[in-house]
Image: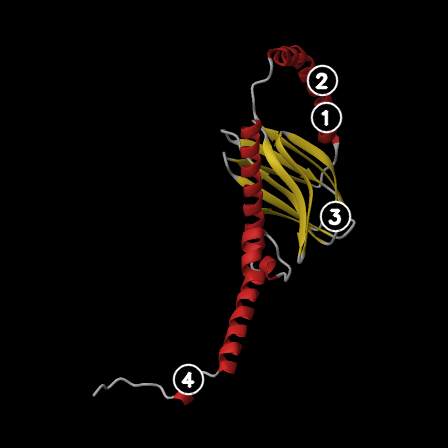
Amino acid sequence: MYNSDTPVRAELPSSRQLVRSTILAAVSAAVLLVAVVLPAEYGIDPTGIGRVLRMTEMGDIKQQLAAEAAADAAAAATAAPAPASASASAKAAGPTLGMASANASQPTASAASKVQWRDETPFTLTPGEGIEIKLKMAAGGKVPYSWAVEGGSVNFDTHGDAPGKSVSYEKGRGVSSDEGVLTAEFTGNHGWFWRNRGQADVKVILRTRGDYTDITKVK
């Protein structure tokens, strides 16, 4: 009376086939999680595929943005008016501290200008913009560096990465300059990420020399 086709029992998948399909689906999902989702969302790349496909950089930037947003929220939540006495003390100490800071930074700038640098990399960051500069270094390599901001300050993260490896050397917020020696913990890319959280454009000049074979700018 009805023309609908009813599958016979032999055409239905067996329990073994269903189990096998489920296992294959679970394995495929796990592969996608490890090879795509972790690098692209969290900067975690245990297989190295994310680095090859340039997805790990996107994950690193997402994590940096999330960390900055959390730190901004925490700072705003904990900020409170200072007591009158503390405020008066701060005002009284302010000129002295400012003069000490200016005097301390002057020799640094002068010394940096006299060093024979291998590369000088200037760039401009608009409000909210970030940039990353990477150096290819071998394990144990040392790179003396100096960078300074004109027109404001930046947030920064000094870090390194390689297939299956990552390290954060130093982080800072609202910093106008930094200098030192970057020592590679492993063979790979090592360098800096800067972001301008101010309301105006800033210019950053990075100067480097030492044990590296290549320098790359990533936006």
State the separation of the CA atoms marked 2 and 4. Answer: 83 Å
State the separation of the CA atoms marked 4 and 1. Answer: 81 Å
Q: Give whichever of discs 2 and 1 has the lower sequence position.
A: 2
Tell me residue 182's x, y (percent). Answer: 73, 42
Q: Give whichever of discs 2 and 4 has the lower sequence position.
A: 4
Q: Residue furthest left?
A: 1
Q: Identify the residue position indicated by label 4 in the image.
A: 12
Mark 4 residue element: loop
Q: Nearer the viewer, residue 168 or 1?
A: 1
Disc 2 to disc 4: CB gap under 8 Å = no
- Name the quadrant of the N terminus: bottom left
Q: Identify the residue position indicated by label 2 in the image.
A: 100
Vertical placement of residue 29 versus 14, above or below: above
Tell me residue 113's x, y (percent). Answer: 71, 30
Q: Give whichever of discs 2 and 3 has the lower sequence position.
A: 2
The amino acid beneath tag 3 is Ala
State the separation of the CA atoms marked 3 and 1. Answer: 27 Å
On the picture, is 100 further left or further right than 12? Answer: right
Q: Nearer the viewer, mark 2 or mark 1?
A: 2
Q: Give whichever of discs 4 and 3 has the lower sequence position.
A: 4
State the separation of the CA atoms marked 4 and 3. Answer: 59 Å
Label number found at residue 184? 3
Mark 3 residue element: loop
Disc 4 to disc 1: CB gap under 8 Å = no
Mark 2 residue element: helix
> Callout 4: few (<14), some (14-19), or many (20+) C-alpha neighbours within 10 Å?
few
